[in-house]
Image (spheres, rainbow, N blue to C red):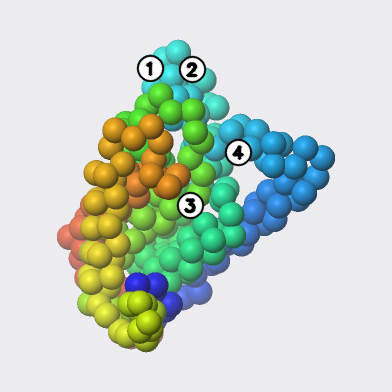
């Protein structure tokens, strides 16, 4: 199931969501330029290692034997790096569909803080599972997972237009957010459990970053719901 859009209007322009998408695209174009230059993919790999969130580096910082500033920089910068076009486009599609409404509900600056902190929590969740890994975590997936968790709690009945492909059958259907996001989270849990004990994350995907980010976002969603109903539209 691939979500394409939601029937959930916003009260204001999602400036932060659009800016995050633009920043990820610009950074990815820089990655492409690096990979096409002298040294090619080898230079890009070193760049991702320097600017990605490396679990062993973060673990060392948490234990007091590493540079916390370098570890924190890697966590933040990793949210804007992507490993390929599919990785980038998939993440940006989810961010655009679900991020605008969460931004609308939280407010622009709170959403930016939420997004960055959610991404950090997601990275730490993966570090907890594989603290000595030297493979850098890259991608906005953890922060987007936090956004999905918040959306699920805040808008569980929102209708999501989804592309469903089953073998030779393909069609567009509308399903509640709780169905598609619940299914997505279930897949992360199953794949995460299956990846335990493996030398690297299955398929290069940091499933526990997704799980940790989603759980953190859902918690924030619960706190926002407990704080009161959704504000009325301007002039309403």
Question: What's the residue at 37%, 27% (across, down)?
Answer: 131
Disc 4 versus disc 3: nearer the observer: 4
Would you call the spot at circle 3 few (<14 residues within 10 Å), some (14-19), or many (20 or more)? many
**Residue linked to disc 4:** 48
**Residue linked to disc 3:** 140
Residue 43 at what x, y percent from top left? 71, 36
Q: Is residue 73 above or below residue 1?
A: above
Residue 138 at what x, y percent from top left? 51, 44
Q: Earlier in the sequence, mark 1 or mark 3?
A: 1
Q: Residue lying farthest right?
A: 38
User: Which image quarter is the C terminus in?
Assistant: bottom left
Question: What's the residue at 70%, 55% (across, down)?
Answer: 29
Query: SS for tag 1?
Result: loop
Q: Nearer the viewer, residue 198 or 90?
A: 198
Would you call the spot at circle 2 few (<14 residues within 10 Å), some (14-19), or many (20 or more)? some
Marks 1/2: CA–CA distance: 7 Å
Q: Are marks 1 and 2 in contact (CB under 8 Å)?
A: yes
**Residue linked to disc 2:** 66
């Amino acid at each position: 199931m691939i979500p394409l859009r939601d029937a959930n209007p916003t009260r204001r322009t999602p400036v932060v969501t659009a800016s995050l998408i633009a920043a990820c695209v610009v950074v990815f174009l820089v990655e492409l330029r690096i990979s096409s230059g002298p040294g090619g993919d080898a230079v890009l790999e070193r760049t991702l290692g320097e600017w990605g969130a490396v679990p062993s580096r973060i673990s060392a910082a948490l234990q007091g034997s590493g540079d916390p500033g370098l570890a924190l920089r890697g966590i933040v910068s990793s949210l804007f790096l992507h490993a390929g076009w599919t990785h980038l486009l998939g993440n940006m599609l989810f961010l655009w569909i679900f991020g605008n409404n969460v931004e609308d509900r939280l407010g622009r600056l709170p959403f930016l803080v939420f997004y960055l902190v959610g991404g950090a929590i997601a990275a730490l969740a993966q570090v907890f599972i594989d603290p000595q890994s030297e493979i850098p975590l890259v991608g906005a997936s953890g922060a987007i997972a936090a956004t999905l968790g918040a959306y699920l709690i805040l808008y569980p009945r929102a209708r999501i237009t989804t592309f469903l492909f089953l073998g030779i059958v393909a069609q567009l259907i509308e399903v509640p957010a709780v169905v598609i996001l619940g299914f997505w989270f279930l897949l992360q849990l199953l794949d995460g459990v299956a990846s335990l004990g493996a030398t690297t994350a299955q398929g290069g995907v940091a499933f526990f970053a997704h799980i940790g980010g989603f759980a953190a976002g859902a918690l924030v969603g619960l706190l926002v719901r407990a704080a009161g109903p959704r504000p009325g539209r301007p002039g309403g």
